[in-house]
Image: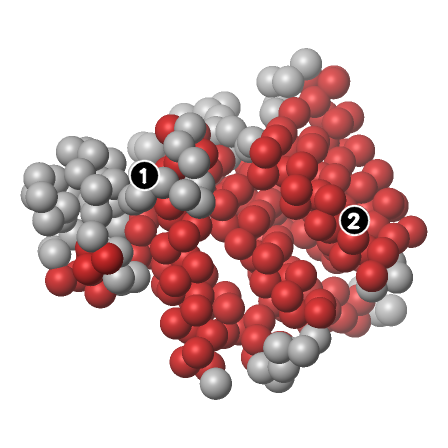
Amino acid sequence: MPIIFFISGLIIGSFLNAAIYRLWTGQGIVYERSICPHCKHVLSAWDLVPVFSYLFLGGRCRYCRKRISWQYPLIELVTATCFVLLAQNFQFSISNIQFWFQLVFICFFIVIAVFDLKHYLILDKILLPGSVLALIYAIYTHHLPQGLVGILIISGFFALQYFISKGRWIGFGDVKLGIFLGLIFGIGQGIILLFLSYLVGALVGVALIAADQKEMGSKLPFGTFLTFCGIIMLLYGKEILSFYLQLIGF
């Protein structure tokens, strides 16, 4: 059973790579053929086998021989791994509706994380359908009140920073992303998500400064940290929250 989810994740990961590229170029996400980002040659089915094609072709386009980004096999493998771990959480039961909701949320998170990392931008065309789906999820799981408070905590926290700094500390896309995340994670997990995101962001920032890749005060794609930690919370949020509550004596 895990191999089925892994292969499915590889295929969906390949689609997510295409979506990330096409959202930037303005191409249609579903109906247009995949092309080489360098020479624009239409790719054949053999060029699009997840991970295998990249390795077989040595990370280069079959037609122009220019190097293809390592992003493509990495996202395919990350998506596949997330699919298996999430399915394991649900004991590989595909009849659980919450599993499918969370599977789609992981896909949204991956697209947002990579797109923000590459372009420092969180698109409304990703956030709007994601937030609508999260609202349906909150209603279905009967935690809409918690979800609304989660919005106040996450999105409200970012909105406060945005207006105080006039957009210098944080972008308005993060404020809107907070709506999406708040509906999914609610109060307890939402607070943990914020803490983890700032912790990961700080660690990455320090590492980049130490490696002379960034300077103090440089911008970082915080949406990437939020959605990366969002995946961690979807997979292990209950365990992390339980550990934290035990740590503080609750």
Instruction: Judge whether residue 59 can be spotted in this image.
Output: yes
> How many numbered marks appear?
2
Residue placed at 78% from the left, 53% from the top?
136
Which coloring applies here? secondary structure
Where does residue 66 sit, x and y in percent of width and height? 11, 40
Residue placed at 40% from the left, 32% from the top?
27
Instruction: Judge whether residue 186 can be spotted in this image.
Output: no
Query: Is 248 displayed left or right of 88 in the figure?
Result: right
Q: Disc 1 on helix, strand or loop?
A: loop
**Label 2 neighbourhood size at 10 Å, few (<14), some (14-19), many (20+)?**
many
Query: Is 112 displayed left or right of 53 in the figure?
Result: right
The residue that mark 2 highlights is: 135
6 in relation to 111, above or below: below
Residue placed at 53% from the left, 42% from the top?
112
Where does residue 148 sit, x and y in percent of width and height? 86, 45
Q: In the figure, residue 161 lies in which quadrant?
A: top right
236 in relation to 132, above or below: below
Q: Nearer the viewer, residue 155 or 3?
A: 3
The residue that mark 1 highlights is: 211
Q: Specify the amino acid type for callout 2.
A: Leu
